[in-house]
Image: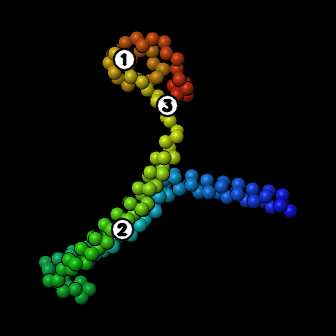
Amino acid sequence: MSMLQNETFSRVGKGARETLGGFKAFILRGNVVDLAVGIVIGAAFTNLVNAIVSGLITPLIGLFGGFDFSGLNAGRFAFGTVINSAVSFLIVAAVLYFLIVLPVSKLMARHKKGVPEESATRECPYCLSSIPVGARRCAYCTSELGHSEPSSASVAGS
């Protein structure tokens, strides 16, 4: 019976690791975090814009045009509402940045650190211009660079 339980637990553990690995890859793509942060910031910014319009712009228009919008007194500006909305927006933005964006960015940088990228260019030893790795002559100073073996990057581009 214990042998059967060990195999079952092994399969369940392997499935859980695969599922969590897939979830980690999904989150680390960055699009998910960007979208979530954008939605939350958008909602907070909507509140700020609504406060500015209802507290400052609408009474200002009422002063010049003599119109009374939604029972607002034309001489009354709601500076406190606008300031509260601005402070609230800044707090939401700071919390999102420090608790979500910054940790996910660090996690993504740590995840991508293990994959070194091969450069498709090199410097010309004569004029220090950036040229393709497989080039035999510099395109800028036309110096002979000798015979260099084309790398996989330059072969793939052909």
Image position of 30 with respect to 91: above or below: above
Q: Amino acid at mark 3?
A: Glu
Q: Amino acid at mark 1?
A: Pro
Query: Does dot 2 land on a helix, a strand or a loop?
Result: helix
Identify the mark nearer the N-term, 1 or 2. 2
- Judging by the rendered image, the residue that carries numbered circle 1 is 125
Q: Quadrant of the N terminus?
A: bottom right
**Can you tell which quarter of the image residue 34 is in?**
bottom left
Query: Does dot 1 land on a helix, a strand or a loop?
Result: loop
Question: Which residue is at a point 42% across and 57% down the rendered structure image?
Answer: 101
Question: Which residue is at a point 55% across and 26% down the rendered structure image?
Answer: 152
Q: Position of residue 32 (x, y in %)?
A: 50, 58
Separation of marks 1 and 3 at Cα, in angstroms: 19 Å
- Judging by the rendered image, the residue that carries numbered circle 3 is 118
State whether residue 66 appears in this view: no
- Judging by the rendered image, the residue that carries numbered circle 2 is 92
Separation of marks 3 and 2 at Cα, in angstroms: 40 Å
Query: Does dot 3 land on a helix, a strand or a loop?
Result: loop
**Can you tell which quarter of the image residue 17 is in?**
bottom right
Residue extending farthest to the right is: 1
